[in-house]
Image (cartoon, helix red, strand yellow):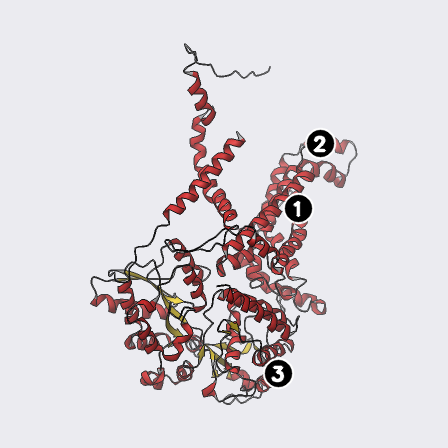
């Protein structure tokens, strides 16, 4: 009897495997096909508002090519949701929340449409975004993502806390590492803040985008973590940045514990590394100011690079009506829609000469001008194979050496660079 | 009077020709084919939710496998034990198995001892029994995410526990201390899951014969002696079940390190094999490597279960 049950179970399992293999049919998508399409946008309130008006505007003029829009289904992260949808074959045509770090993985899955294959694909993208677009090319030189919007990160600081610590809130000394450290010491020693700054010290792969990477981008003059498939950070710039953060942690100027909430909003830290979204979030609840991220010896603010924190638009191979999807993609990134995006969200369209294109917006919203200017000097995560794994390796080493000081910074940089080189070459 | 079961009456046949298909049908469908109908939904459930994923995971672990879009032309060659070699050469995997070993060494004995003691206490108290049973059960039915927030409040650097400990508080604090992170998580999981095991023991205690306690009393046994000589042997099947379930759920540790220590920190001191499977399989797109970790985990759990069965679960 037992043998029969085992046999039946095994046969059933094999049968299910076979069924699943049979069900994996090819998609019928086509780059010339037109008709209704589905799009997903982020579940951020301001982005939904923009998305709804964009869809209404398109649908009003295209009765035979309607857009059905919805928020990205809930999941641990949008990348995981999209990855699962690709595998299941039910990804929408366009996702307005595609993380550049996830693009190499989605591409490997065969989930993304090569936008460069559209007749005007390359030209449209490079004309809209300028030189910044090159960071989003995949290893074969083509675009599998439409550079869409960035949130160039800067240092936000609490003016009231700075005043309490005896610092000048209008001209805070935060340009060089020495200045930043001295300011941090004054903030903590005076009791104005528990920590000077409190980036998440946790181990998720993306956390280095909000502590190490912005400062590395600035210190290196706009160098990506890997270039030409080789790690760049095992040099004096990487070492300077890692040493700076290691000092912040060892002197308890930055918190090593996970904070449950927003430490800056809760006035537990006097500074934070955030993008332009923070203007709307902190509003009047924090008396804030912002400055570019620091560099070792200081730099003219107009030359300082930072991390882009971009989200892009991906077109997915499950899409049947790709010609319509491409037109919608261009419509939604047009000068008019980018302007509406800027108004609705305060996030920067990845468009060249942003401040010159929307002078009225920036003169009416001077707080955003710094971000508009900064958007031209942003560094993206490298578009390489095994991108997420590389960042995880980097984070693990960073956590050990920099946050917890249990390893030499130089050893961490060398080991992380070796692993990154190896992973990037695996394809 | 003894009840005698009689076999079902056989249908007489003129010759043996009709009996053969009947025998074949009975061999495949059993004596009561209706039973198959009733058990079919569960059988399908087991096949779809357990058997298929396990077989698929084992198969994946021997391929260069990644999830792909339907119809995408991708190469997923057979790679033999390459994924297992990669897994066994990865220090993070060893660390995660070591971490879960520490977890089990703390969690399983504490679970068995405290759930038995508390169940015994609940079984004997006369007043406020319902209140205590509900009190113990509240953490078990409360969402992990909510409970985790309470523990973060208790065990953070300036949390309540450190305030009470004063200068004795560890530095770095509990959840960012490489030596204390996993024991803290083990305590948390023990506390949170205790109620379920208490229920198992409470049910088992109902089956311990009262006559045995009375006999022990007549022989002059005290409360402690009765506990060790009557209660503990009396609930041994439940103890085996508790050991087994605590080991299996402990080996599947994921939510607590993910939420309490932000992804297995500090320095991976609280990472677990399942957390690594999530990172490698879902976040990094290497389900083949994740499957290899999963298969190794299954083998180790089966091994532990076999040892437990040998030493605790054997019937007298």
Task: Determine which of the numbered discs, if any, sits on residue B112 in the image.
Answer: 1
Residue under the image location 45 percent in, 23 percent down: B26
Q: Is residue B159 left or right of residue A298?
A: right
In the rendered image, residue B208, in percent from the top left (x then y), is placed at 66, 34
Distance between mark 1 and mark 3 Cα atoms: 50 Å
Could you tell me which chain the residue with mark 3 belongs to? Answer: A
Q: Is residue A394 left or right of residue B220?
A: left
Packing grade of label 2 (10 A; few <14, some 14-19, many >=20) is some
In the rendered image, residue B3, in percent from the top left (x then y), is placed at 57, 16
Distance between mark 3 and mark 2 Cα atoms: 71 Å
- Depth check, front residue: B56 or B65: B65
Packing grade of label 1 (10 A; few <14, some 14-19, many >=20) is many
The image quadrant that residue B117 belongs to is top right
**In the image, are marks 1 and 2 on the same chain?**
yes
Could you tell me which chain the residue with mark 2 belongs to? Answer: B
* Image depth: mark 3 or mark 2 in front: 3
Distance between mark 1 and mark 2 Cα atoms: 23 Å
- Depth check, front residue: A9 or B37: A9
- Depth check, front residue: B224 or B306: B306
**Depicted B206 relative to depicted A81: above or below:** above
- Determine which residue is flagged by label 2: B212
Of callouts 1 and 2, which one flags the residue occurring earlier in the amino acid sequence?
1
Could you tell me which chain the residue with mark 1 belongs to? Answer: B
The image quadrant that residue A251 belongs to is bottom right
Secondary structure under the numbered disc 1 in the rendered image: helix
């Amino acid at each position: 009897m037992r043998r029969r049950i085992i046999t039946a179970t095994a046969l059933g399992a094999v049968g299910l495997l076979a069924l699943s293999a049979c069900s994996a049919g090819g998609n019928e998508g086509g780059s010339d096909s037109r008709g209704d399409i589905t799009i997903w946008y982020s579940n951020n309130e301001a982005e939904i508002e923009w998305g709804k008006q964009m869809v209404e505007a398109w649908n009003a003029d295209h009765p035979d090519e309607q857009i059905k829009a919805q928020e990205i289904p809930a999941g641990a992260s949008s990348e995981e949701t999209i990855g699962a949808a690709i595998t299941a074959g039910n990804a929408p045509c366009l996702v307005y929340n595609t993380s550049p770090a996830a693009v190499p993985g989605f591409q490997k899955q065969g989930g993304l449409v090569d936008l460069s294959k559209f007749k005007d694909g390359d030209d449209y993208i490079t004309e809209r975004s300028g030189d910044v677009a090159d960071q989003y090319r995949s290893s074969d030189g083509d675009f599998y993502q439409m550079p869409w919007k960035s949130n160039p990160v800067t240092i936000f600081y609490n003016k009231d806390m700075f005043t309490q610590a005896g610092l000048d809130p209008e001209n805070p000394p935060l340009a060089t590492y020495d200045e930043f450290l001295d300011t941090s010491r004054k903030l903590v020693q005076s009791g104005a803040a528990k920590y000077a700054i409190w980036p998440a010290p946790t181990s998720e792969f993306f956390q280095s985008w909000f502590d190490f990477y912005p400062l590395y981008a600035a210190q290196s003059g706009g160098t990506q973590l890997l270039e030409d498939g080789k790690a760049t950070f095992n040099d004096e710039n990487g070492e300077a940045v890692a040493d700076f953060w290691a000092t912040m942690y060892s002197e308890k100027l930055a918190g090593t514990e996970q904070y449950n909430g927003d430490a800056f909003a809760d006035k537990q830290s006097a500074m934070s590394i955030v993008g332009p979204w923070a203007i709307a979030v902190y509003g009047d609840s924090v008396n804030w100011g912002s400055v570019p991220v620091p560099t070792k010896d200081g730099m003219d603010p107009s030359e300082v690079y930072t991390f882009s924190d971009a989200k892009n638009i991906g077109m997915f191979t499950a899409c049947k009506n790709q010609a319509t999807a491409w037109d919608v993609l261009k419509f939604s990134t047009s000068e008019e829609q980018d302007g509406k995006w800027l108004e609705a969200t305060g996030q920067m369209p990845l468009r060249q000469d942003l401040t010159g294109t929307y002078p009225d917006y920036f003169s009416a919203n001077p707080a955003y001008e710094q971000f508009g200017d900064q958007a031209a000097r942003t560094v993206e995560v490298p578009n390489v194979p095994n991108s997420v794994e590389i960042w995880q390796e980097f984070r693990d080493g960073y956590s050990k050496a920099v946050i917890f000081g249990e390893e030499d910074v130089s050893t961490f940089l060398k080991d992380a660079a070796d692993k990154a080189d190896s992973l990037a070459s695996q394809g | 009077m003894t009840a005698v079961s009689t076999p079902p009456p056989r249908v007489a046949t003129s010759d043996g020709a009709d009996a053969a298909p009947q025998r074949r049908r009975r061999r495949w469908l059993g004596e009561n084919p209706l039973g198959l109908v009733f058990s079919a939904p569960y059988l399908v459930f087991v096949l779809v939710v357990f058997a298929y994923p396990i077989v698929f995971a084992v198969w994946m672990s021997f391929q260069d496998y990644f999830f792909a879009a339907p119809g995408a032309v991708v190469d997923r060659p057979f790679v033999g034990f390459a994924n297992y070699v990669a897994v066994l050469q990865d220090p993070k995997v060893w660390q995660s198995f070591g971490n879960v070993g520490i977890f089990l060494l703390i969690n399983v004995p504490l679970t068995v001892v405290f759930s038995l003691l508390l169940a015994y206490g609940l079984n004997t108290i006369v007043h406020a029994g319902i209140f205590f049973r509900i009190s113990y059960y509240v953490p078990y039915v409360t969402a992990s995410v909510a409970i985790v927030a309470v523990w973060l409040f208790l065990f953070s650097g300036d949390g309540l526990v450190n305030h009470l400990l004063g200068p004795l508080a560890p530095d770095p604090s509990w959840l960012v201390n490489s030596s204390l992170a996993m024991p803290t998580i083990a305590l948390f999981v023990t506390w949170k899951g205790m109620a379920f095991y208490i229920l198992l023991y409470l049910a088992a205690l109902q089956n311990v014969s009262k006559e045995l306690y009375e006999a022990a009393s007549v022989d002059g046994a005290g409360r402690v002696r009765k506990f060790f000589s009557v209660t503990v042997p009396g609930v041994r099947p439940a103890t085996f079940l508790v050991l087994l379930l605590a080991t299996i759920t402990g080996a599947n540790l994921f939510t607590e390190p993910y939420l309490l220590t932000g992804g297995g920190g500090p320095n991976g001191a609280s990472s677990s094999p399942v957390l690594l499977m999530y990172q490698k399989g879902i976040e990094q797109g290497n389900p083949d490597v994740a499957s290899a970790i999963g298969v190794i985990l299954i083998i180790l759990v089966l091994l532990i279960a076999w040892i437990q069965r040998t030493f605790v679960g054997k019937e007298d």
